[in-house]
Amino acid sequence: MDIKTLDEIIERHKTEKGALVSILHDVQKHEGYLPEEVLHHLSDTLHLPLSELARVATYFEQAFSLEPRRNHTIKVCQGTTCYLKYGDQVVTEIRDEARKEGEDTLFNLEVVRCRGCCDSAPVVEIDGNILDRESATRTIIKLKGEKK
């Protein structure tokens, strides 16, 4: 993001109460994530510690991303039921499958809390579709095949 565009976003929101969240939303909309260099510029311009910007961005983790979004989003539930049914192993398996052949750039892998589907635990959500462990693995393999 160029500095001019960023400064225009800051200027547009500078009189708002709680302008930081609005500014971050506009940057997220423009860039698809919150680039590190943007956060540094915001820190300097708004006279806020970088840690404060990171705190706000990570608190609203569903709204903001500190990494570029990839083509597909995989969310693995780590709520109590999913965790007890080895949801942490599912994260490892999916990470390993997504990285085979160096294709981890195709997926965003996120660990989330309860998806509300405890009867299907451990639950995996791929691009908004709730899947069980086996279906998720098949879907990841299929999506990787479509890329080629």
Image (spheres, helix red, strand yellow):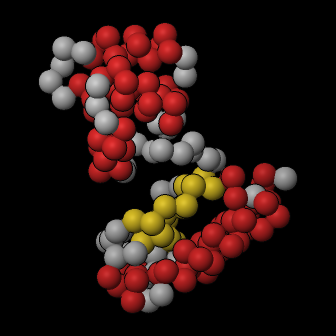
Q: Position of residue 4 (x, y in %)?
A: 49, 10
Residue drawn 31% across the image and 36% down it = 49
Q: Is residue 135 above or below residue 20?
A: below
Q: Quadrant of the N terminus?
A: top right
Residue drawn 32% across the image and 82% down it = 80
Can the viewer see residue 138 in this picture? Answer: no
137 to the left or right of 86: right
Q: Nearer the viewer, residue 2 or 75?
A: 2
Q: Position of residue 41 (x, y in %)?
A: 43, 24
Can the viewer see residue 44 in this picture? Answer: yes
Counting every numbered tag in the picture gives 0
Q: Residue furthest left?
A: 17
Q: Is residue 87 above or below residue 56?
A: below
Q: Position of residue 63 (x, y in %)?
A: 36, 43
Which image quadrant for residue 50? Answer: top left
Residue drawn 72% across the image and 65% down it = 99
Q: Nearer the viewer, residue 74 or 138?
A: 74
132 to the left or right of 101: left
Q: Is residue 70 above or below residue 115?
A: above
Q: Nearer the viewer, residue 21 or 112?
A: 21
Q: Position of residue 21 (x, y in %)?
A: 28, 32
Which image quadrant for residue 17? Answer: top left
Residue drawn 29% across the image and 50% down it = 59
